[in-house]
Image: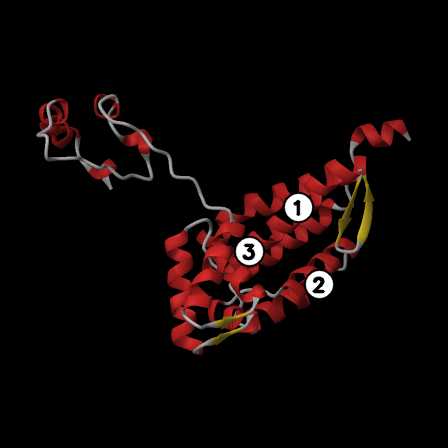
Amino acid sequence: EVHSLTADAFNALLKTLEEPPKHVKFIFATTEAHKVLGTITSRCQRFEFRPIPEELIAKHLSDIAAKEKIEATDSAIRAIARLANGGMRDAQSILDQMISFCGNKLSVEDVIGVYGLASDEQISGLLANMARGDYGAVVKSVDELADSGCDLYRTMCDLQISLRSAMIDSFESGEADFGGKKLSSEHSHYLLARKLDVLQSSTKSMKNGLSEKANFEVALLKAVEQSRARAINTLIKE
């Protein structure tokens, strides 16, 4: 983590970096490149490592499972790839842990149980309750998620992914499917963007607040309230 070096430590390296021994290569790794002194970066070749797409991670994990004679369902592999957040090393570590826990047969239920993920059915059910504006059902869904040991922070991220996907679809098709509710193009852009904004602004408070569950509930109820709002230009047009 080269950004942890002090300015004095960097300055001590400068001469060596300018004229390195032929047998030496320095490799500086950092997740915060902006903290590295300009005098250092100007003397380096810079390579940006991007997150790996889930499809590629899933394909590689499937290859590993086949070689190791591990029976893993496609949905289990996809769940592991999603958990890895673009990191192949993390994906392989998760796969290794799942094999340690569950043996040579892995299902999506195993991954959900070990890592506290919400299932696709739970996510879609929660979105349907939000789309209907059913506050009581939303709170009940949150209780069920918490009682089953789901990671609510991860569930919040999955909800945002689903909402973003619905919004992108609305740009392409002219309408959006939000929790089984069809929305027109003009209303869907506004509604889904507002909901996403509420959920994203609440993500930080979930980690820093006194009660993750309470903050999660409040965020969802605020997002439901956004479905009652309408764009000013739409009202004027009507």
Neighbourhood count class around disc 1 (C-alpha, 10 Å): few under 14, some 14–19, many 20 upward: some
Residue type, label 1:
Ser
Secondary structure found at label 1: helix
Residue type, label 2:
Gly
* Picture disc at residue 151: none
151, above or below 47, in the image: below
Where residue 22 appears, as percent x and y from the top left, is 10, 30
Query: Which residue in the protein does label 2 denote?
Result: 125
66, above or below 83, in the image: below
Q: Tell us which disc is closer to us: 3 or 2.
A: 2
Residue 197, picture quadrant: top right
Q: In the rendered view, does 128 fall on the left or right side of 95? A: right
Q: Residue furthest right?
A: 238
Q: Tell us which disc is closer to us: 1 or 3.
A: 1
Neighbourhood count class around disc 3 (C-alpha, 10 Å): few under 14, some 14–19, many 20 upward: many
Q: What separation in Å lies between label 1 and label 2 (alpha carbons)?
A: 16 Å
Q: Nearer the viewer, residue 160 or 222?
A: 160
Where residue 221 appears, as percent x and y from the top left, is 67, 54
Q: Quadrant of the C terminus?
A: top right
Q: In the rendered view, does 36 fall on the left or right side of 205? A: left
Residue 142, picture quadrant: bottom right
Query: Which residue in the protein does label 3 denote?
Result: 215
Q: Nearer the viewer, residue 55 or 182?
A: 55
Query: Which residue in the protein does label 1 denote?
Result: 165
* Mark sitting earlier along the chain (1/3): 1
User: Does residue 209 appear anywhere in the picture?
Assistant: no
Residue type, label 3:
Asn
Q: Quadrant of the N terminus?
A: top left
Residues marked 1 and 3 touching at CB (< 8 Å): no
Secondary structure found at label 3: helix
